[in-house]
Amino acid sequence: MKNALLKTIQNFFEEDDLSRNLFYQKSLPTDEVLCSLKIKSPLILSGLPWFEASFQYLDESFKLPDGILNDEGKRKEVGDILQFKLPFNIALNGERIALNLLSHGSAIATYTNEFVKKAESKNIKILDTRKTTPGLRSLEKYSVRLGGGVNHRLGQTDLWMVKDNHKTFFGGLEEAVGFFDSVGSFYNETEVEIHDLDELKKALNLGVRHLMLDNFHPDQIKEAVKIKKEGVTYEVSGGINLETIENYLIEGVDAISIGRITYGAPPVDISLKYERV
């Protein structure tokens, strides 16, 4: 895992281009400093492996104290401080990338948890989508899990998702489902994006087990639940937010997928300050 993270982190440091000014780099003091990670807004902490790897890329001997690593996935409040030590040059060069990743992961975990708390009374799972930031899918989907959500597909081939473009290209619902059935492995499941009750009935008759009710009105969902078959799952999707989610917490719905938990999480506030030891 460490090597995989460092490979990802390398791309971020290449973007930051620290090697462009070697005189500056060689001039930076290497005195040890006490670093204080300060929590400035309530949050669920997520992304410490990426935070740690950002400094390990510059100093392979660096390791966060176990006490800090144990805070991963825990709720932190304003005024909480996590402390560790680093050489000044490593702290200075790594802090922005490390903080960007930790703040981004923590924002997603915190926002996801707000949806999870609303849906848990009905035992409805909150799913992410593939609307993730290129290069950051691993962090973002990891953070969804720490926020109490559940991952949908990590990639296209985890589950065949039959969408409108597939139906149009192959000539209809049955043809699109047939294509994916023909290219899948023994354990590949298929999910179909559904837009009305008539299409839902066709998919059920084809034996599709996983159905995404896309942009269904709550009244339509209630009708869909009436014809739900045993062993079938209903996923609801389409512009659902914290203000509207209560309308979709309907008995018979198994999951709600929300793209905004990865692409639209409100930022959290974390800073890193350091001083000479």
Image (spheres, rainbow, N blue to C red):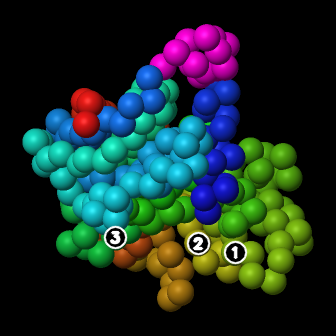
Residue 126 forms part of the magenta stretch = no
**Vertically, is 107 above or below 200?**
above
Q: Mark 2 points at which residue?
A: 210
Q: Earlier in the sequence, mark 3 or mark 1?
A: 3
Tag 2 near tag 1, CB within 8 Å: yes
Residue 152: give x, y in percent of width and height: 54, 62
Which numbered circle lies on residue 208? none
User: For the stretch drawn in magenta, what is the main secondary structure?
Assistant: helix
Q: Is residue 215 visible?
A: no
Viewer-side residue, 112 vs 82: 82
Residue 27 in sight here = yes
Q: Which image quadrant: the N terminus?
A: bottom right
Classed neighbour count for the residue bearing mark 1: other residues with Cα under 10 Å, few (<14), some (14–19), many (≥20)? some
Measured along the vertical axis of the image, is residue 55 above or below residue 63? above
User: Left or right of 263: which side holds 110?
Assistant: left
Give, as a three-letter code, the residue at label 3. Ile
Position of residue 218 in the picture relative to residue 166 (left or right) = left
**Dot 2 crowding, Cα within 10 Å, few <14, some 14–19, many 20+:** some
Q: Residue at x 83, y 72 (%)?
A: 184
Please tell me in which quadrant of the rendered image residue 271 appears: top left
Check the image and report above or below for 52 versus 101.
Answer: below
The quadrant in which the C terminus is found is: top left
Residue underneath mark 3: 124
Q: Which structural element holds mark 2?
A: strand
Residue stretch in magenta: 16-28
Element under disc 1 = loop
**Gap between marks 3 and 1 measured at Cα:** 20 Å
The residue under label 1 is: 189
User: Which kind of residue does numbered mark 2 sit on?
Assistant: His
